[in-house]
Amino acid sequence: MNLKLDSTVTLNNGVKMPQLGMGVWKVNNSGAAQSVEWALKHGYKAIDTAKQYGNEPGVGKGLQQGFADNGLKREDIFLTTKIFNGDQGYQSVLDNFEGQLKDLQTDYVDLLLIHWPVDGTYLDTWRALETIYKSGKARAIGVSNFNIERLQDILKHGSIKPAVNQMEFHPLCQEVDIKNFCDEHDIYLEAWSPLGGGSVLKDPRLQQIADKYNKSVAQVILRWDLQRGIITIPKSVHEERIVQNADVYDFELNEDDIEEINGLDTDKRSLWYGDFFWSGNPDGYKDSVEDWKD
Ligand code: A2P
């Protein structure tokens, strides 16, 4: 296998997306600017943010600095952002998306996702994403946190198939049914919190595997993502970890170790990832948006 940071997967519309990038959830604007600068310095080709993270301006600033410092152009980087829950609905998405582009200091994004399936509006939101896609301001469109029922809804009512479904995915949360559904429908599964927000890194079973390869647990998990065909976006605000998380191309997990990690699934999501997100309780998501502000 010959994988490096610029190795890509091909999405269902033909667009190529780097399989490993960096995420910036729970990072404030100045932290995001710094992390993005480091990521570009160390060869990352993909950055994932969201309006809900409150750090799109920081990401925009970090990208501009990273382009200048490293002789890069906008088209060298694959940029993903997501539609804020409170902006959902056809016209509201169209009206607010321009502000996201402005904050990100770009004319287009490479991938635009519906952040959460807010019930009652996500089909209208999807129509808006289709309009944005057709205008060329998003090179690909997809969803995040969609279960099978809601993916089916989009497939049934939309005219464009989502390219990606971004889900919580790590060794303890493998979403087997959703992954199988995505594979069947040529939708890439992208892992958010691929390191389980840091908690999975202490697992002694993973440590044992990591010791065998002389790698860290984080590197083993990210390598497992790559070999499983998952798109992955680990987050770190530390330069040495940003470097470490990209240093996953000089070893290959054997089948037994892949199987062992596959066997760690507990079929549980993070605690905060409560039912209200799935039931679309309007007060629930507002509270959670407040919680997400750093
Ligand atoms: P930090 O940002 O302080 O480096 P996830 O991507 O699953 O959400 O996980 C991110 C968490 O894991 C963050 O708390 C991050 O902390 C931590 N983290 C990221 N990379 C590593 C690494 N290589 N080693 C240890 N912890 C890491």
Image (cartoon, helix red, strand yellow):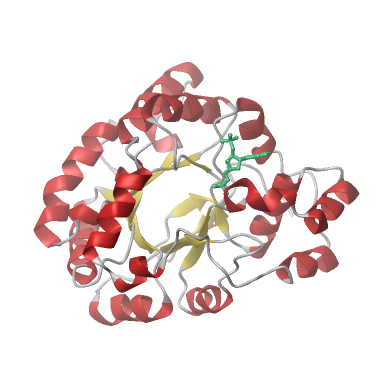
* Image x and y of residue 185, in percent: 45, 77
Question: Quarter for ligand 1?
Answer: top right
Left or right of residue 183: residue 144: left
Answer whether residue 61 is visible to the viewer in this image.
yes
* Image x and y of residue 125, in percent: 20, 63
Answer whether residue 50 is visible to the viewer in this image.
no
Along the line of sight, which residue is nearer the eye, 92 or 70?
92
Location of residue 58 with respect to 263 vertically, above or below: above
* Image x and y of residue 167, in percent: 48, 62
* Image x and y of residue 142, in percent: 36, 62
Left or right of residue 138: residue 213: right
- For the N terminus, which image quadrant? bottom right
Residue occupying image coordinates x 34% and y 68%: 276
Residue occupying image coordinates x 25% and y 33%: 103
Residue occupying image coordinates x 13% and y 61%: 90
Q: In the displayed orientation, state which residue is furthest to the right.
A: 212
Q: In the displayed orientation, state which residue is furthest to the top.
A: 69
- For the C terminus, which image quadrant? top left
Along the line of sight, which residue is nearer the eye, 252 or 152?
152
Residue occupying image coordinates x 55% and y 24%: 41
Residue 58 picture quarter? top left
Residue 248 picture quarter? top right
Along the line of sight, which residue is nearer the eye, 227 or 283?
283
Total of numbered circles in the picture? 0
